[in-house]
Amino acid sequence: MIKGNFIRLGFAVVFIAAGLETGCLAGSPSAWEEIARMGSGINLGNTFDAPDGEGTWCRQPAQAGFFDDFKAAGFSHVRLPVTWQKHMQETEPYTVDAKFLDRIAEVVGWASQRGLVVVLNAHHEGWFKDDPADQVKRLEALWRQLATRFKNMPDQLLVFEILNESEAKHITAIQTTEMNERILRVIRETNPSRCVIIGAVGDNADRLVKELKVPDDPHVIATYHCYDPWFFVCGEPRNPAEATWGTAAQKADYLKTMDAIKKWSDLNHVPIYLGEWGTSTKCEAKSRVEYYRFVSAQAAAHSFSNAIWDDGGNMLIYNRETRGWNTKILQAVFPTNSKAKKPNIPSGG
């Protein structure tokens, strides 16, 4: 018990120190202020979201040095996908494994020490996604524990994301609204002003515009994911027209989704987080670079924060073994950032 209290106190001190260093303790940010702070980010994918644990998908475990590299490259936040399914009890009181939670807190701490915002979520939670009506109490228990563990971290440095990509065949728009409201109430018990990200069914862009109901809360952010056009993005074109990307028509088609969401955002006064996007390493190289340049620039133009999906493998732009970047893509994402051009950032990936 005493050891656990010292661990929690230690993380609180780290979080507060990070906030003082970055000027983050002036007050709780609104959702709009937090989205501006988050700017461009990167996912630490296929690490803690792997259902069987760290090292089972991407073999390279998380390291503190990754966050030095993310910061140096120009990113302002890291999305930390976590699958909690095998790290918590299946029956009440649904206790989260303390050792696993300590590991997540360690990684969150690495980011906060460097002034990087973290988006922490519940990711491949099949137990809930397949049976939301019967498993919502377990989801509440999970978020009550997470909210309690991280309640002392400055609001500016940590954002909660309730659920990644629910399953349309198992959950309705009405159930999604109820879930978002219930979990938000749980989080608010201990985190009254922390920003919380919610999505429509499946984090689907069309369903966000048509169905998402946003609670009356100034600290709520809406999210969607976009891997369009799919057959180009996944590197498996069905015909020559899908093998490359970057024509005026292709860009106009992509913007239809962004423009519709921007219109919804302005109408509902809710900021937007493009939580996942990117391309396979199998894509044609020149088109891939242009895709990253265009989407990054348009996200900023639409006032969206965004996080590139990087899984350390098929969709990497950052090689976790060599700690090297695909420098052409990095410079496309940050064209005016001199840090992305310094020779001490190794090439590769």
Image: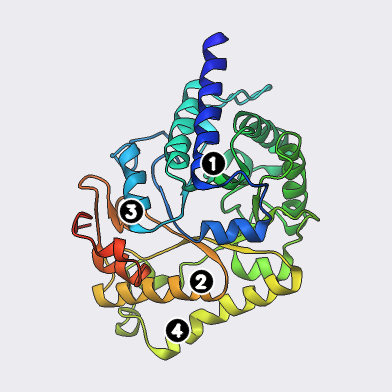
In space, the residues marked 1 and 4 are separated at their CA atoms by: 39 Å
Q: Is residue 229 visible?
A: no
- Residue 32 % position (x, y): 65, 61
In space, the residues marked 4 and 2 are separated at their CA atoms by: 15 Å
In space, the residues marked 3 and 1 are separated at their CA atoms by: 19 Å
Q: Which tag, 3 or 1, sits closer to the chain's start?
A: 1
- Residue 331 % position (x, y): 30, 68
Q: Which tag, 2 or 3, sits closer to the chain's start?
A: 3
User: Badge 2, how many Cα within 10 Å: few under 14, some, many 20+?
Assistant: some
In space, the residues marked 1 and 2 are separated at their CA atoms by: 25 Å
Check disc 1 and report the residue beneath it. Answer: 19
User: Badge 3, how many Cα within 10 Å: few under 14, some, many 20+?
Assistant: some
Check disc 4 and report the residue beneath it. Answer: 251
Marks 3/1 in contact by CB < 8 Å: the verdict is no
Residue 346 lies in quadrant: bottom left
Q: Is mark 1 on a helix, strand or loop?
A: helix
- Residue 254 % position (x, y): 49, 79
Q: What residue type is labelled 2?
A: Ala
* Res. 300 mark: 2
Image depth: mark 3 or mark 1 in front: 1
The structure residue drawn at horizontal position 44% and vertical position 42%, both measured from the top left corner, is 111
Q: Given the current orientation, which residue lies at the most extreme top position?
A: 2
Image depth: mark 4 or mark 2 in front: 2
* Res. 72 mark: 3
